[in-house]
Amino acid sequence: MTGATRWNDLAPRLTSALVMLGVGGVALALGGLWLRGLLALVCGAMIWEVIGLFAPHEGRRALALAAATAVAFFVATWLPISAAAIVMLLAIVLIYKCLPVKGGLLPAYGALVSAGAMGVFGLY
């Protein structure tokens, strides 16, 4: 890859980053339902993306598991932390049972996504 072609997609990437930063900033400023909704969508999108990497042939199942994770996170944000941890653990177990990817990397990633999102929400 030459130097010129390496930077061809810089403008779209910067634009995308600025839009995401703006959406995240607005959700953070509004807080409450908006922040919970955005974090739930981000969790679902990250799970969908990683399922696509580990099991690319699982199109509809990946979408269903991503939606289940997003709903689980959204519900978990309304619960005390101990109950929220149980809800997110159930989502991770659901992912593992539906897609037992070799090595257990998928549920481990799900746990990291869940913990990170709960941490971000906890900071608010």
Image (cartoon, rainbow, N blue to C red):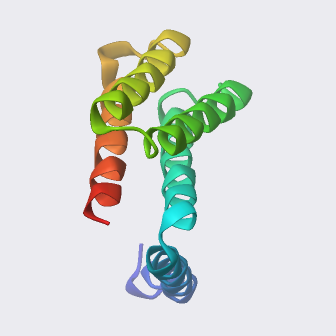
- In the figure, is residue 31 to the left or right of 107? right
Q: Where is residue 57 in the image (x, y as percent from the top left)?
A: 65, 26
**Looking at the image, which residue is at 46% across and 44% down?**
78
Q: Which of 19 and 11 is in front in this view?
A: 19
In this rendering, the count of numbered labels is: 0
Residue 86, compared with residue 72, is above or below; it is: above
- In the figure, is residue 124 to the left or right of 69? left
| Quarter occupied by the C terminus | bottom left
Q: Which of 56 and 39 is in front in this view?
A: 39
| Quarter occupied by the N terminus | bottom left
Q: Where is residue 26 in the image (x, y as percent from the top left)?
A: 52, 81
Residue 123, compared with residue 92, is above or below; it is: below
**Looking at the image, which residue is at 56% across and 83% down?**
19
**Looking at the image, which residue is at 41% across and 38% down?**
79
**Looking at the image, which residue is at 51% across and 55% down?**
42
Residue 100, compared with residue 68, is above or below; it is: above
Q: Position of residue 2 (x, y in %)?
A: 41, 80
Q: Position of residue 97 (x, y in %)?
A: 49, 10
Q: Quadrant of residue 84?
A: top left
- In the figure, is residue 78 to the left or right of 52? left
Q: Nearer the viewer, residue 76 or 60?
A: 76
- In the figure, is residue 92 to the left or right of 48? left
Q: Nearer the viewer, residue 59 or 28?
A: 28
